[in-house]
Amino acid sequence: METIKTYDRFPSWIVATSNLLSLLIYGLGFAILLLINTLLASIYLAFVLSLEIRIIRNHCINCYYYGKTCGFGKGRISALLFKKGDSSRFCTMKITWKDMIPDMLVVIIPLIVGIILLIKDFDYKILIAIALLLFLATMGNGFVRGTLTCKYCKQREIGCPADKLFNK
């Protein structure tokens, strides 16, 4: 069996790629909701920001990559904003599919709104936005997490609740 080398600090191109994917997903979601109104799109952005802060505040502070460059760059951001937590807590955390619902809503809400807009008044631009959002959220995330980040993550070796959930 081949041993995979983990990164102590991820290369900047991986961090840029993973963040670009997230920004594209968030941007498409925002653009779709903006077709309804500015308030809904703004609430969506506030929701996305709250999820990012929740991860950095509650998870990244306990991660091996706290203060370091993880595959998403959040370890360094976390160190700038919050005090270091307890690394042993990260390994003992449990994540269930129920815990993932807020993260899934980032994609589900714009998809539902986009489908409603398509039914109401078909537009190829909306169809393309929905298809692209679905592709990035599934295939894009699968590629980034499976090929670029999680595969080389030292925290995964130590113990990662997300790895336990997704790779049962």
Image (tube, rainbow, N blue to C red):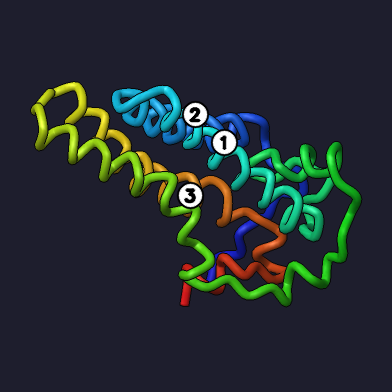
Labels 3, 1: front one: 1
163 left or right, relative to 97? right
Q: Is residue 103 above or below residue 21?
A: below
The vertical placement of 79 against 63, above or below, is above
Q: Real-space Cα distance between discs 3 and 1?
A: 30 Å
Residue marked by disc 3: 147
For mark 1, does the 10 Å Cα neighbourhood hold few (<14), some (14 to 19), or many (20 or more) residues? few
On the image, the x and y values in percent for residue 157 come to 68, 67
Identified by mark 3, the residue type is: Thr
Residue under label 2: 42
Q: CA distance from mark 3 to mark 2?
A: 33 Å
Res. 12 image quadrant: top right
Q: Quadrant of residue 89?
A: bottom right
Q: Secondary structure at mark 1?
A: helix
Q: Position of residue 80 (x, y in %)?
A: 86, 37
Identified by mark 2, the residue type is Ser
